Amino acid sequence: MQVEYDGDVMTLNMGPQHPSTHGVLRLELKTDGEVVADAIPHIGYLHRCFEKHCENVEYPGIVPYADRLDYCAAMNMELGYVLAVEKLMGIQVNNRVRCIRIIMAELSRIASHLIAAGTFGNDMGSFTPFLWCFRDRETILDIFEETCGARLLYNYNWIGGLMCDVLPGFEKKVVDFVDYFEPQVDKLNTLLSNNLIFIKRTAGVGIMSPETAISYGVTGPNLRGSGVQFDVRKDEPYLGYEEFDFDVPVGKGEFGPVGSCWDRYMVRIREVKECCKIIRQAAAKMTPGDVQESIPKRVKPPAGEIYHRTECPRGELGYYIVSDGGLKPHRLKAKSPCFTVMSAFREVSRGAMIADIIAILGSFDVVLGEIDR
Amino acid sequence: MKPEEIGALLAGKFGDRILETKVDGMNPWSVVDPAEILPVCRFLREEERLAMDHLECLAGVDYKDRIEVVYVAYSMKHRHRYALKCRLPRQEPHLASVESVWGVANWHEREAYDMVGVIFDGHSDFRRILLPDDWEGFPLRKDYKFPTSYLDMPV
């Protein structure tokens, strides 16, 4: 979009220590009054050179590093990595491992979307939903803690299996949580999603067209918010997702044009209900088995390369792994969904108001740990 | 389309500028003459039968004797994937920017420069992205020496 400006352009620095930038992100805003002529993101404040670390540790040792990419959804991060290595090595896991992984991934997706919705509401000036979301997320973290001992960074998915089996009564606990949680989503809708002030702040703001979204490699809820029906779980199933019955919600533009901040937010809320459906089915499908039976003694993939992607809460997480037949990867590249959506930020925010920058950034739901790697 | 068909289509269109094709692996690819990368990428995106509108991954890989840049492209319409590779010398690797084909290439190319040191010509905003602007060296090169200090601060 081209915007004509007549006033003086002022440079305004937002971040890196700004509560609404969800981490350490610096935005260089060129403003004309209240209108943002250009918003240039500066990233890299959390850079750890994950990819260099990976070249210096053996394959199983990378799992904890992968956790630290997106610390709000660590379960999905490590799952993507182990699935890529398993595919490279041709390892098949049994049904129990698959079901537990799916339950964990979907629980983690719910937890992550709760953070997204809560902080987005908080950014828009609504504090109570934030507390509600974090209260429900706590139950999920308790389930994780009980299973693997950690609340945030799990190291639970191992190449070929799991760190340990779940405790007896796990299925019941998970289904109980889902039963409790589903009505909470409707309550959240009455409090936040259909709140008039919230709608006025977010609907019609930060519109991303499907063409822009695809060109900038935007994936996940942000892409679906623009009305594109695409979900890796449906369109390129892994881990047996094709056997599950769930829908892929897309933005419909109930309150204004499709692809606005409200649409992106609402896709996440609707997705949470689909996660509940998947969890119920996976809990019913669980069969007894040894969760460590396929763990190889030495992880030594054959020479070759693979690009494998999974649907993590923030979009499509891809791992490009080049193996030279050794114990360490020759090259590992993590294609992070937040990185690509952030590259579209400049395009989407051009011509917005300064206050809307917060709305756009909140609706993108980026985690800086994953952008900077 | 199947990877074999995509490989054959590219070979038919670009002839000897497609240097090598391997479609039986898990990540089917063709090696493209570096001078031709922009037309080939544009073909991938604009040809009706390919319609690869989504650049999934752009990675620079250091193989000690050469630098490879890998483009993994995907079609949202036809649901197929194909990878292109360019082999470049380790000294001053230059490549044309494909930013005009896929918007996301802008940041991916900046990252490939930042980490592996590939120089993309015709890029609209070419600078480091993750590391500070005054950083020296490219960390994902295999011969990278870990610095012992940064701006006189020991690390």
Image: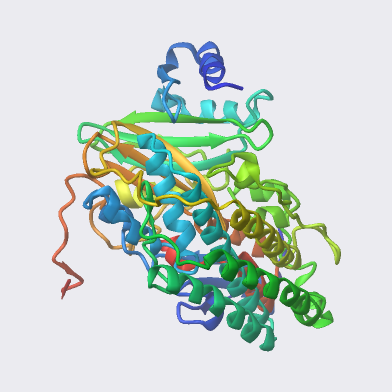
Q: In the visual, does A366 lie left or right of A69? A: right
Looking at the image, can residue B16 be seen?
A: yes
B69 or A115: which is nearer to us?
A: A115
Q: In the visual, does A213 lie left or right of B27? A: right
The residue shown at (45%, 21%) is B23
Q: Quadrant of the N terminus of chain B?
A: top right
Q: Is residue A373 above or below residue B2?
A: below
Q: Is residue B141 above or below residue A186?
A: above
User: Residue A310, position in %: x, y?
Assistant: 52, 48
The residue shown at (43%, 74%) is A145
The residue shown at (47%, 39%) is B97
A137 or A250: which is nearer to us?
A: A137
User: Residue B98, position in %: x, y?
Assistant: 51, 38
User: Residue B70, position in %: x, y?
Assistant: 41, 35
Residue B80, by quadrant, is top right
Q: Quadrant of the C terminus of chain B?
A: bottom left
Looking at the image, can residue B107 be seen?
A: no
Q: How is the image coloured?
A: rainbow
User: Residue B63, position in %: x, y?
Assistant: 24, 35
Q: Residue furthest bottom?
A: A128
Q: How many marks?
A: 0
